[in-house]
Image: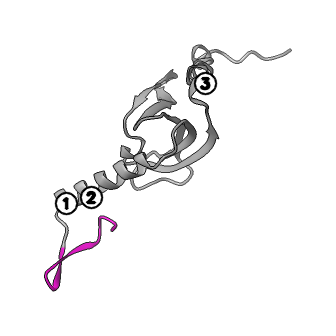
Amino acid sequence: MPPNCETPSSSKTVPMTTREKANHIKQLQDEALRNLPPNTLYIVLYIRSDPPEPNNFHWGFYYHGEHVGGWKYHMRNLGDGWIADHGMSSGVFKSTFLCVLIQIADIPSGKRDQLDQIMRSRDGDVNSSILSLE
């Protein structure tokens, strides 16, 4: 039941309290996370603001491990530059601005370290000047 629905109480319906809605959303998020296939790679897309602005998104990668949780890989803009922001994630669905999660690959469990190395391989280049060919 979506969190904006009402719950039945006897013969009439009673709106869910804020706490009940929050608990219901958490249960749905936990269930969705448990149902993700293990060892899968996703592109994640987030809106940047609420209400959303047209064509204003942030994206990254999420690798779902064999257990609940996984690793996020994305870059963050800090003023004039970018920084790598990679790390463990216990709940990709917990972001309020998550818009889309698209599975793009199955990664064998023995290849997770290689995936991590590939995902981090260009971190040192994110703020490098672009060289022009003359």
Regarding mark 2 in the picture, which secondary structure is present there?
Answer: helix
Label ID, residue 20: 1
Residue at the image point whose x is 40% and y is 38% from the top: 68
Q: Quadrant of the N terminus?
A: bottom left
Q: Assess disc 3: are there few (<14), some (14-19) or many (≥20) residues with their C-alpha within 10 Å of its C-alpha.
A: few
- Residue 99: image location, x then y, percent: 48, 51
- Residue 111: image location, x then y, percent: 61, 24
Answer yes or no: do the residues labelled 1 and 2 have beta carbons within 8 Å? yes
Give the extent of the magenta segment.
1-14
Q: In this rendering, is residue 107 above or below 53?
A: above
Is residue 6 found left or right of 96 in the rendered image?
left
In this rendering, the label closer to the viewer, 1 or 3: 3
Mark 2, residue position: 24
**Front residue of 41 and 78:** 41
Mark 3, residue position: 111
Mark 3–mark 2 Cα distance, whole angstroms, equals 35 Å
Mark 1–mark 3 Cα distance, whole angstroms, equals 41 Å
Regarding mark 1 in the picture, which secondary structure is present there?
Answer: helix
Residue at the image point whose x is 61% and y is 33% from the top: 107
> Looking at the picture, which amino acid does disc 1 mark?
Glu
Label ID, residue 58: none
Q: In this rendering, is residue 96 above or below 86?
A: below
- Residue 7 lies within the magenta run: yes
**Front residue of 16 and 52:** 16
> Looking at the picture, which amino acid does disc 2 mark?
His
Residue at the image point whose x is 42% and y is 41% from the top: 92
